[in-house]
């Protein structure tokens, strides 16, 4: 059979094109396999091996658990591709539900109902397993530069979808640095929290009618907001990074004006 050179070139080009546009085909296959395994576990009738349980009677009233928080991160990596590689290598043990690139492209990496590994050792209020209660969103940013307008626009659209889909409270849109102040600083002081709050994603302050009472306990107020205050210096820095970014690198105390901001946030929490 005669083989035409131009046909060989065409087949080679198609092969290269297919591979180039499906670089994560192998890991997508692993995802489907793992999701199928978990689906099998859910379908199983539980074994009655927990005393004093004696019988299994399946209720007809249930649905999937849903996320109640959104945690925003910056990737601290050089590109979206670097983040994709990190999140598709088993040895890294880290992941997120969404990654938003600097050009505004949104990549969905995990079903919202599944538990991503993005929060690590973290705490907010009485919640000590943030991974089980939240959706993690990573923004392609190294932490030392402003976020791109198109990236924030895409984030706002995504957050609006998640808020309506899962009925997430306004106060429950927070940052990784808020829930892990001793370990993390993302999404950095460059992140436009006020812009998001104006759209209903997260709290913001109004100090117009606020006065600081005598003997005001700032750490207690931070605990009421949700912060873990075991490392008080780190917690105050995290609060400033979120609400007072211009002063987030100076000192670990709150002045009178900053205490008013904290009181305003506490009252809205």
Image: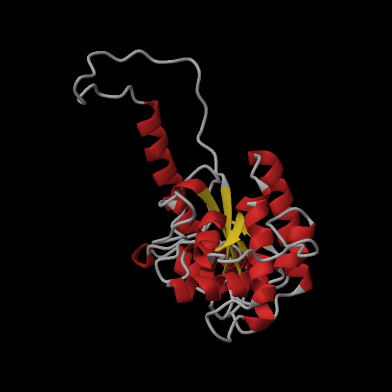
For the point 45% across and 49% down, the residue is 127
Asked if 175 appears above or below 60 in the picture, the reply is below
For the point 38% across and 32% down, the residue is 40
Asked if 39 appears above or below 27 in the picture, the reply is above
Residue furthest to the bottom in view is 250
| Relative depth, front residue between 56 and 133 | 133
Quarter-of-image position of residue 211? bottom right
Locate residue 35, reporting x and y percent.
Answer: 44, 42
Quarter-of-image position of residue 50? top left
Q: How is the image coloured?
A: secondary structure
Position of the N terminus by quadrant = bottom right
Asked if 162 appears above or below 77 in the picture, the reply is above
For the point 25% across and 24% down, the residue is 47
Quarter-of-image position of residue 16? bottom right
Locate residue 202, reporting x and y percent.
Answer: 68, 57
On the rendered structure, is 192 left or right of 133? right
For the point 57% across and 56% down, the residue is 225
| Residue 144 visible in the snapshot | yes
| Residue 101 visible in the snapshot | no
State the count of labels. Answer: 0
Locate residue 217, reporting x and y percent.
Answer: 53, 65
Asked if 114 appears above or below 42 in the picture, the reply is below
| Relative depth, front residue between 16 and 186 | 186
On the rendered structure, is 166 left or right of 230? right
Locate residue 129, reporting x and y percent.
Answer: 41, 51
């Amino acid at each position: 059979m005669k083989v035409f050179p131009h046909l060989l070139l065409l087949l080679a080009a198609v092969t290269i094109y297919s591979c180039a546009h499906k670089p994560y085909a192998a890991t997508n296959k692993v995802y489907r396999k793992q999701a199928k395994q978990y689906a099998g576990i859910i379908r199983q009738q539980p074994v009655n091996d927990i005393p004093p349980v004696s019988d299994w009677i399946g209720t007809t009233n249930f649905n999937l658990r849903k996320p109640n928080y959104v945690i925003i991160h910056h990737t601290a990596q050089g590109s979206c591709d670097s983040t994709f590689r990190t999140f598709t290598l088993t040895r890294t043990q880290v992941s997120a539900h969404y990654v938003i690139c600097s050009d505004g492209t949104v990549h969905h990496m995990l079903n919202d109902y599944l538990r991503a590994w993005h929060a690590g050792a973290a705490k907010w209020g009485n919640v000590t397993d943030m991974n089980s209660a939240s959706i993690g969103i990573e923004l392609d940013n190294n932490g030392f530069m402003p976020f791109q307008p198109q990236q924030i626009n895409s984030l706002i659209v995504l957050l609006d979808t998640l808020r309506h889909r899962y009925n997430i409270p306004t106060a429950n849109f927070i940052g990784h640095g808020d829930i892990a102040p001793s370990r993390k600083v993302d999404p950095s002081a460059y992140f436009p929290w006020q812009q998001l709050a104006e759209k209903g994603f997260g709290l913001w302050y109004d100090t117009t009618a606020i006065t600081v009472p005598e003997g005001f306990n700032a750490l207690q107020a931070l605990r009421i907001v949700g912060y873990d205050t075991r490392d008080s210096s780190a917690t105050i820095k995290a609060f400033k990074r979120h609400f007072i970014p211009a002063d987030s690198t100076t000192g670990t105390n709150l002045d009178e004006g900053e205490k008013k901001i904290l009181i305003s946030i506490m009252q809205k929490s």
